[in-house]
Image (spheres, rainbow, N blue to C red):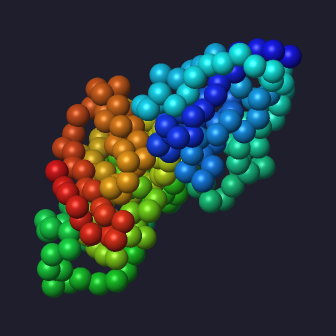
Amino acid sequence: MRRTIIEIDEEKCNGCGLCVDACHEGAIELVDGKARLVSDEYCDGLGDCLPECPTNAITLVEREAKAFDEEAVRERMQERSGECAGGCPGLASVAFSTERGDAPPARTPGGDAPADDHRDSELRGWPVQLALVNPRAGHLDGAHLLIAADCAAYAHADFHRDFMRGRVTVIGCPKLDDNGAYREKLREILENNDVRSITVARMEVPCCGGIVAATRSAMLEAGVIVPYDEVVLGVGGEVVSTG
């Protein structure tokens, strides 16, 4: 049949992933760093993704395409939800005790380590994946919150010591995941807990800006403004900027 459907110009696409988040039918995925329509039958042709694209790489066209299939979309979204049958033990909220106290370290990342420096884990709670975190988990109340891009801990050698110490850590990938869902989860966390401060640790790559946007939007929507810091790491792990 001939109908209206999206078309993506891969030359213009910068791989930010915002269109992936905007598509509620899961019709768009990032493939080799570029947005791609994975199947005609998943696209309803309404174009919710268009206004989210910063490079105008997406347009609506009329062409021969498979009909939009609501049942196929429903099955696809169920498969992508990744829910464990009967409840997954890995989703249970766990708080870890620490002898470090509640305050983050007063030090510059990459500077001289405190005299009591050690190599133990600084993780304060589980799970850490933002999509899995219970926004009412007890260890979030009164927390200094670290919102980190997945890659940050792999890039920066002393990530536990420099950033996680004294903070409750949640992580996510703004390029591969749903930034809209991140924003909603962070809003719920802020509305249900007395969060004392927020630090966002992201990579310098453009797509990592999604986690910053989600955090700032969540603060505004929740009406909760707390001390905020942003750390940008280079792909080699070095601290590019703070503030």
Residue 45, percent from left and from top: 68, 18
Dividing the picture into quadrants, the one containing residue 108 is: bottom left
Quadrant including the N terminus: top right
Query: Vertically, is 12 above or below 162?
Result: above
Residue 139 placed where, x, y %? 39, 53
The vertical placement of 187 against 92, above or below, is: above
Q: Nearer the viewer, residue 7 or 206?
A: 7
Residue placed at 81% from the left, 21% from the top? 64
Above or below, 168 against 186 in this view is below
**Which x, y percent locates residue 41?**
80, 28
Residue depicted at 53% across the width and 41% down the height: 11
| Residue occupying the point 31% across, 51% down | 200
- Judge by depth and name the residue closer to the eye, 133 or 3: 3
Q: Is residue 69 visible?
A: no
Which residue: 29% across, 41% down? 194
> Is 17 displayed left or right of 46 in the figure?
left
